[in-house]
Image (tube, rainbow, N blue to C red):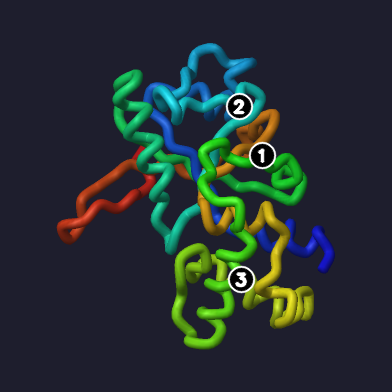
Amino acid sequence: MSEDVWLEIASKLPYCHGTSSKFVAPIRKYGLLPRKTDGTRPSVYEKELESRKHDAVYVSTYTDNIPSFCGQAADNAVKAVGGEPRVLDVKLDKEDLKRFERDEDSWSEDYRGLFKNACEFSRETGMTAACYDNLVKNVIGDAIKTGKLSLQDACNPPRWFAEITCFGRFAIKDGIPREKIGAVRERVVRDHRYEWEPVKK
């Protein structure tokens, strides 16, 4: 299956970046810059989890509409520099995704196997499974319906796609321009649970 098809599928998924409210204005103005070009934003992790890619920026996938890793990154940023936790929606196109960089804390060498098992389980049962949630299921389903992806290829993506959808954290080399930054979200409590809603201007 063509790599270009998987890039198109991945470009339809929603992505995010977790940060402190202190950095929202500069990100809006300049985009997400790697730390080698932006000395104002330190790594928000410590010790073995410290971000080591100085020429890339870290983003995450939404999982069933929840920016889970981005929320954690936002909390870590607030602990490191103060401010309020914020999640920025990020739009990645095919060219952006070609600059995929693996997260150095990735814990498995077999994301393709994990994805394949989850994908086959989802197709057989109609239920979603880890690393194959509804967002991923829908964009792959659309690609099958339009003939861009065969049923046989649907559960066998390239490694980078499997890692994005299973691990949920990765980096984009050389940063992300400001026009790719969407809504800024804040955490609110609704019905006794946390949700992320766009900040009211």
Spatial separation of the CA atoms under disc 1 and disc 3: 21 Å
Tell me the CA gap for discs 2 and 1. 9 Å
Mark 2 vs 1: CB contact within 8 A: yes
> Please, what secondary structure does the residue beneath circle 2 have?
loop
Rendered residue at 61%/22% (across/down) = 54
Residue marked by disc 2? 53
Disc 1 marks which amino acid?
Answer: Glu
* Badge 3 density bin: few <14, some 14–19, many ≥20, Cα 10 Å: some
Q: Amino acid at mark 3?
A: Lys
Across and down, in percent, residue 91 comes to 60, 47
Which part of the image, by quadrant, shows the C terminus? top left
Image height of 128 relative to 32, above or below: below
Q: Position of residue 124 (x, y in %)?
A: 53, 87
- Which of the two labelled residues, at mark 2 and mark 3, occupies the earlier sequence position? 2
> From this viewpoint, which residue is outermost toward the front?
109
**Residue 94 falls left or right of residue 163:** right
Please name whichever residue, 172 or 101, is drawn nearer the observer in this view of the structure: 101
What is the x, y in percent for residue 112?
A: 64, 62
Quarter of the image for residue 181 reads top right
